[in-house]
C-alpha cells in the first residue's frame, strides 16, 4: 500500500537532455507517493550514444534545487551490465527469446501504420520469429560457434526479441488510471531485450533494477503504459515480483503537444535562469497549461 513505511519508490531519468517541467512534475508526484517510505534514484544511462555526463550533472542539480530528495547513492545502469546479462541468459535458456536480424530501417519500412508523435515501437511484423523458441540452443543464430562460447560473450551480433504470447491480455490495475489491459501482438509485439551491440534494452534493465531495488510502486509517465505490459511479461518469465504502478498524465505545451526535450524554454534550468523559485515551478505543474494534461 503506497504511503506505508515499506514503500519503496524510484525516480529514473535518462540523461539524454535537460529535464523539463513534465519530468519535474512526474518526479514531484513520485516524491509525494514516497513521502512515508523510501525514494531511490536510478540514472538510466545505458544509451552510450545519447547519454552525456553533463546531463547527469544537470538533472541532479535541477532536482536538488526543486527539492526532490532521495535516499542512498545514485544507481548508474552503466555499472550494472553483469546483472542484465545474467537475466538475458535466463530468458534465453528459458526459451523466451529469439535472434532478430532486422535493422531499424527495415522495421520502419515494414511498419504499416507508424503513428506520428507516438514513441512506442510498432508491433513487430514477425519477420525473424521462429515457430517456437524452444529449446534455447536452436534459437541461436548460426554465427554462434557453440552455446557456451556464445553465452560467455556479451556481443552477439544480433538483436534478441521476447516472444509475446499471441492474443493474451496483460492486465494490471494502475493506482492512478485504473484497470489496464493490453493484448499481445495487437497493442504491442515481440520486443527488443538485447541489442546486437551488447546493450540490454530499457525493458530488461528496468525490470532487473526494479526487482533488485525492491521497488514497491513505479511512478512514471503514462507514455510508458505499454512498457509496463512488456515488463510484466519479463517479470513473469524471470520469476520476479510485479510492483504496483502509478502512471502520471503527461504535460503538453499550449498547442497540445506533449512536452519533449525540444521544449528547451520549459527546461528546469531555463525556468531557474528566468528567476523562478522552486515553489513557482511547482505551481506551474498544475496551472501553466490547464488545457493540457495529455491522455
Ligand atoms: N528513463 C525513463 C525516462 O526517462 C523512465 C523509465 C521508468 O521510469 O521506468 O523516460
Image (cartoon, rainbow, N blue to C red):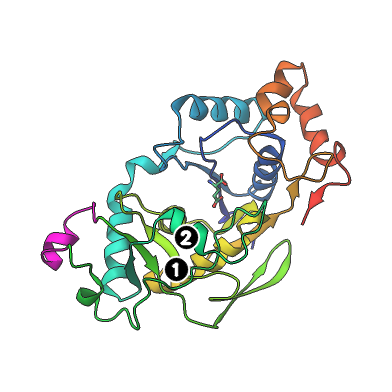
Residue at image coords 65%, 47%: 30
Q: Residue furthest front?
A: 109
**Left-right relation of 288 to 270:** right
* Segment colored magenta: 144-156
Looking at the image, residue 19 lies above or below residue 240: above
Instruction: Give how far across and how far down residue 277 sits, in percent.
Output: 77, 22
Is label 1's Cβ within 8 Å of ligand 1? no
Q: Nearer the viewer, residue 126 or 168?
A: 126
Hey, which quadrant is residue 84 in on the image? Answer: bottom left
Looking at the image, residue 74 lies above or below residue 220: above
SS class of the residue under badge 2? helix
Q: Label 1 vs label 2: CA separation?
A: 26 Å
Q: Residues within 10 Å of mark 1 (few under 14, many from 20)?
A: some
Note whether residue 224 is visible. yes
Q: Which mark is residue 235?
A: 1
Residue at image coords 77%, 44%: 252
Looking at the image, residue 20 lies above or below residue 40: above
Instruction: Give how far across and how far down residue 239 sits, in percent.
Output: 39, 72
Give the labeled residue for mark 2: 107
Amino acid at each position: 500500500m503506497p504511503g506505508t513505511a515499506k514503500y519503496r519508490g524510484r525516480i529514473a531519468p535518462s540523461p539524454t537532455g535537460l529535464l523539463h517541467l513534465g519530468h519535474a512534475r512526474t518526479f514531484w508526484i513520485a516524491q509525494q507517493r514516497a513521502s512515508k517510505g523510501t525514494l531511490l534514484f536510478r540514472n538510466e544511462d545505458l544509451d552510450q550514444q545519447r547519454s552525456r555526463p553533463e546531463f547527469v550533472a544537470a538533472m541532479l542539480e535541477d532536482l536538488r534545487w526543486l527539492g526532490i530528495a532521495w535516499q542512498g547513492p545514485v544507481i548508474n545502469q552503466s555499472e550494472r551490465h553483469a546483472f542484465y546479462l545474467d537475466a538475458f541468459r535466463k530468458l534465453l535458456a528459458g526459451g523466451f527469446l529469439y535472434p532478430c536480424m532486422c535493422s531499424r530501417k527495415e522495421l520502419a519500412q515494414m511498419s504499416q501504420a507508424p503513428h506520428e508523435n507516438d514513441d512506442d515501437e510498432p508491433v513487430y511484423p514477425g519477420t525473424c520469429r521462429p515457430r517456437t523458441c524452444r529449446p534455447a540452443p536452436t534459437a541461436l543464430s548460426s554465427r554462434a560457434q557453440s552455446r557456451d562460447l556464445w553465452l560467455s560473450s556479451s556481443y552477439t551480433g544480433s538483436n534478441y526479441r521476447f516472444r509475446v504470447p499471441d492474443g493474451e491480455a496483460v492486465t494490471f490495475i494502475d493506482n492512478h488510471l485504473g484497470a489496464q489491459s493490453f493484448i499481445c501482438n495487437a497493442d504491442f509485439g515481440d520486443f527488443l531485450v538485447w541489442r546486437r551491440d551488447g546493450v540490454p534494452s530499457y525493458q530488461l534493465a528496468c525490470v532487473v533494477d526494479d526487482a533488485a531495488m525492491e521497488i514497491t510502486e513505479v511512478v512514471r509517465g503514462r507514455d510508458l503504459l505499454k512498457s509496463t505490459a512488456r515488463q510484466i511479461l519479463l517479470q513473469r518469465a524471470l520469476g520476479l515480483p510485479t510492483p504496483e504502478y502509478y502512471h502520471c498524465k503527461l504535460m503538453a505545451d499550449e498547442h497540445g503537444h506533449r512536452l519533449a526535450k525540444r521544449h528547451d524554454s520549459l527546461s528546469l534550468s531555463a525556468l531557474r535562469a528566468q528567476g523562478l523559485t522552486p515553489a513557482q515551478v511547482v505551481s506551474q505543474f498544475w496551472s501553466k497549461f490547464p488545457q493540457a494534461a495529455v491522455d
